[in-house]
Structures are given as C-alpha cells and as structure tokens.
Image: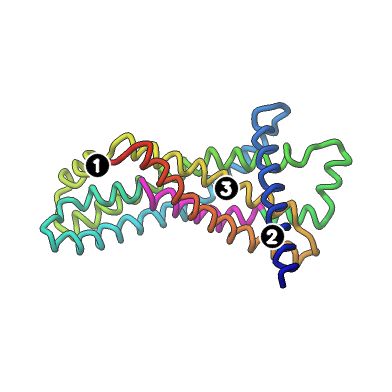
Amino acid sequence: MGRRLSQHLKESVLAVQDYILLTAQGLNALVTPPRYHQELLAQMDSLGVQSLSIVVLTGMFTGMVLALQSAASLDAFGARPYVGRLVCISMVRELGPVLTALMVTGRVGSGMAAELGSMVVTQQIDALRVLGSDPVRKLVAPRLAAALIMVPLLTIVSDTVGIFGGSLISIFNLKLSWEFYWRSVMNAMVMNDLVMGLLKPLVFGLILSSVGCYMGLNTSGGTQGVGLSTTRSVVVASVTILSSDFFITKLLLILFPVA
C-alpha cells in the first residue's frame, strides 16, 4: 500500500514536471522564429469563431438567471435597483471568465487532446521529428497562442452578452428602466474589475490549451488511450481552472482591495 502510494506520488510529480517543461517550451516557441502563422489562424478559428455560439448562449442565460435571482434576494431589502450592479460585477469578475473557459475546455480542450493523441498513436509526431520539424513549435505553440488571444476575446463577448441578458430581464420582467439599469452597470465598473476580468482569461486560456496539448502528446495505448487522454484533459483542465480562479481572486484582492 505504502509502496503503491509512493509510486503514484512520484509519477504525479514527474507528470507535473513534464507539463511545466512542455508549457515553457511552447511559450518560448511563441517568441522565437520560425512561426507557423497558418496553423495559428486555423486554431484561432477553431477555438474562437467556432466557440462563439456556445459562449453567447452561456453568457446570455447566465446574465438572465443572475438578474432573476439577484432581484429575488434584493427585494427583501428594497434594493432591486442594484440588480444591474450585481449582474455586472458577477459577470466581469467571476462568471464570465470561468464559464467561458469551461465551455471552451469542453469543446476545444478535449479536441486538442484527441487530435494530438491520434497523431501520437498513428506515429505522425514521430514522422514530424524525422522530417526535422519540432512538434512543440508546430503543434503546441499555435494552440497556446490561439487560446491566449481568443479566450479573453470570448470572455469579453460573454460579459457583454450576459449584462445585456440581465438588462432584458430587468426591463421586461423587473420593470426597471433601461437608462437606470445601464447607469447602474457603468457605475459598478471600475479598473480593478477590468484587470481581474482580463487577467483570468489569459491564465485560463493557457491552462486549457497546455493541458490539452500535454494530455494529447502523452497518449499511449492505442485508440482507447486517445479516449482516456481526452477525458483526463477535460477533467484536469476544469479542476485546474476552478482552483486557479480562487488563487487569482485572492491575489488580486490583496493587490487591489475593494473599497
């Protein structure tokens, strides 16, 4: 029992070490030539443009639910006019970045692991090395770059759509005026919220893309291994995103205390 636990712990430490090394190599490849621009554009389309619909739907309904739930709670204190403020802060600080990252992880992170895992199983990665190409530079770096660019942009879309969804509920269901709602939203927005709302997607984008690439490139066991890597990619990336969200929030609240 003790030996098995020790072996498992050792393997976990080595896996984390390999993951950090792969991520560092991928980030280094972003700033050194040669670069594969066509692959980057393809990944930006796959990760960003094709994820737009699910991000819009998620953001819209999240904002609408937030408005309904917050109104039900605020009515007890006669504070219904603060619905816009609460929706704005919740979307920009937390729900927008986290839900967007989780949606992209489920749709794209799993795809990265499956695609790279299939290339490993069919020995295409070995073929790239034989041809003199660096798999990290050609396959990993464009995916990291695409995630670092597109996840923040998708988060901005999610935040905007979510706040707009909250306005629809506030106006047509809660009977608040359009002008009052948006004034409340603008008054709630401060620089600290923007910093928090844009820093988190950068970290989450790096996590979901690097985990997907790592799991894919470490696939073994044939087609069954591809499925296992895909599942592990989604689970590990999702848990890491949620846990890192706590530490980022804690750090930013220390650096930028809420007045």
Bounds of the magenta segment: 93-112
Q: Is residue 148 above or below residue 123?
A: above
Give the mark nearer the N terminus: 1 vs 2. Answer: 2
Q: Mark 1 points at which residue?
A: 188
What is the quadrant of residue 258 in the picture? Answer: top left
- Tag shown at residue 97: none
Query: How far is the residue under mark 2 from the one under mark 3?
Result: 22 Å
Circle 1 packing at 10 Å, graded few (<14), some (14-19), many (20+), is some
Q: Name the residue under label 2.
A: 9
What's the residue type where badge 1 is placed?
Ala
Q: Could you say whether the residue bearing mark 2 is in a helix, strand or loop?
A: helix
Query: How far is the residue under mark 3 from the one under mark 1?
Result: 29 Å
Q: Position of residue 174 (x, y in %)?
A: 17, 59
Q: Could you say whether the residue bearing mark 3 is in a helix, strand or loop?
A: helix
Query: For this rendering, which residue is in front, 121 or 41?
Result: 121
Q: Where is residue 246 in the image (x, y as percent from the top left)?
A: 44, 51
- The answer to the question of whether label 3 and label 1 lie on touching residues, with beta carbons closer than 8 A, is no
Q: Residue at x 64, y 55 (%)?
A: 111
Q: Mark 3 points at which residue?
A: 207
What's the residue type where badge 3 is placed?
Ile
* Predominant secondary structure, magenta span: helix
Question: Of circles 1 and 2, which is in front?
Answer: 2
Circle 3 packing at 10 Å, graded few (<14), some (14-19), many (20+), is many
